[in-house]
Image: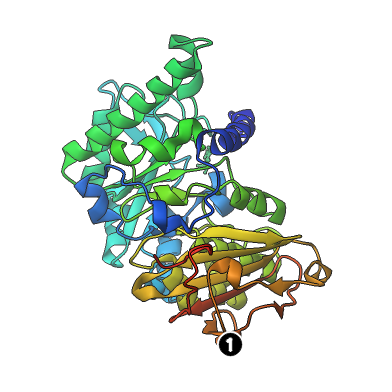
Amino acid sequence: MRVFASLSLVAVALASFTAQSQTPAAPKLAPQAQLATPQVSPKAQVVSQTPPMGWNSWNYFAERVDDKGIRAAADQLVATGMKDAGYVYINIDDTWEGERDANGVLHTNAKFPDMKALADYVHSKDLKIGIYSSPGSKTCAGYAGSLGHEEQDAHMYAEWGFDYLKYDLCSFIPDVMEKQAPHDRAAQMRLMQAAYAKMDKALKATGRPIVYSLCQYGWDAVWEWGPSEGANLWRTTGDITPEWDRIYAIVSQQEGLEEYAGPGHWNDPDMLEVGNGKLTLAENRAHFSLWAMLAAPLLAGNDLPNMKPEIKAILTNRDVIAIDQDQLGRQGARIYSDGEVEVWTRQLSGGALAIAVVNAGDTRYSTHPFHLNLRKLGLTGTQAGKDLWTGKTVELTDNEPLELAGHDVLLVRVDAPKITTSTNEVSVNK
Ligand code: GAL
């Protein structure tokens, strides 16, 4: 992380550049009307039919992750009810790696005395376990990467019993891309794609179903080629931090990407920061709601043994999780914004619809005045639904004034939306 900190900044800039310049303009029609039909491998369909859910060590523990912490996280996933709510993967991020021996076998460092035993422990809880590496010689935190040892490492992950790999570009940039193709951006991107394809092949050769998570910060419109390279998810941006401005910036970069997500292959706006840093409860709620609207992987990244009840309540809100995990697998989209207030919809199975109204402004005065325009959502008449954060029944009416605290969200599920028939309107249910 420290070694490649500057890369992350470049990545942020590039990711937003590619998102803006290489994807089609934001659709005026509902996103589902123009879904791409990417080539997705049968393996992808099997291991991530809905966006992966679990916990990852990086966002809170970073380099402080160890065997004990991973076992504690697995215990807590069960004890807190998160497992029952759908969280399955316990993912070890960077800094587990030791040195390679004379045969090229990578050993763990002292923090992880026995990876196989650890994987067995996590599996004994009826959970799955994930690991991390880089196609470069070094990971982002400067530990050993997989360059030149891809098959060997994939084989080892499978032997240990891993179910998930996050593969982070890191030193592959200076090691290979800049060395082999200096000043030739297109050739560098081809090298990068080939590196991801190589690990996909190595993982497939193990015969074990392993979720394949690409982490290359959204470069080269990864959403266009990721699915055909076996990716189940791909990062669309640089790193998240537990700050509203960063979270909101990431959300803004997802525009236009909705057509690339679907069962087996998901856009990944990065792991959750719910419960981390100084995020307010409203911000935690809005962050979680937006990730659900985006059909994003839900990988919690907080300190599970010390989780506050109100954070647990957010992470285990089953109604919101059901939006994220909806079987249709269609990513939601921002339909319109009015000042600092944004209105998002996501089409759900059975003809249902999720509506999220987000006050991106700092205070409730950003919603003075804000009136919900149902016609812009392709809806007509009163919409009966459920407010997923209060659990109460609500009726949304056209032109209704809504007041939301700064950085807060209203998330409503409408099971039977009344849809406008006019062809000039945005249709939510074609
Ligand atoms: C970054 C990555 C983070 C984390 C970190 C580990 O590149 O985006 O999610 O994995 O490396 O060093």
**Which residue is at 29% across, 40% downward?**
230
Mark 1 sits near ligand 1, with its Cβ under 8 Å away: no
Assess disc 1: are there few (<14), some (14-19) or many (≥20) residues with their C-alpha within 10 Å of its C-alpha: some
Quick one: quadrant of the N terminus?
A: top right
In the rendering, at what x and y percent does residue 415 appear? Answer: 44, 81
**Which of the 4 image quadrants contains residue 343?**
bottom right
Looking at the rendered structure, the kind of residue marked 1 is: Val
Q: Quadrant of residue 190?
A: top left
User: Residue 73, image x and y in percent?
Assistant: 45, 62
Q: Is residue 137 visible?
A: yes
Look at 53% across and 34% down and name the residue there: 141
The residue at which mark 1 appears reads as 394
Q: Position of residue 55 (x, y in %)?
A: 45, 58
Determine whether 263 is above or below 370 in the image.
Answer: above
Q: Is residue 390 above or below residue 160?
A: below
- Residue 306 in view: no
Residue at the image point whose x is 29% and y is 38% from the top: 228
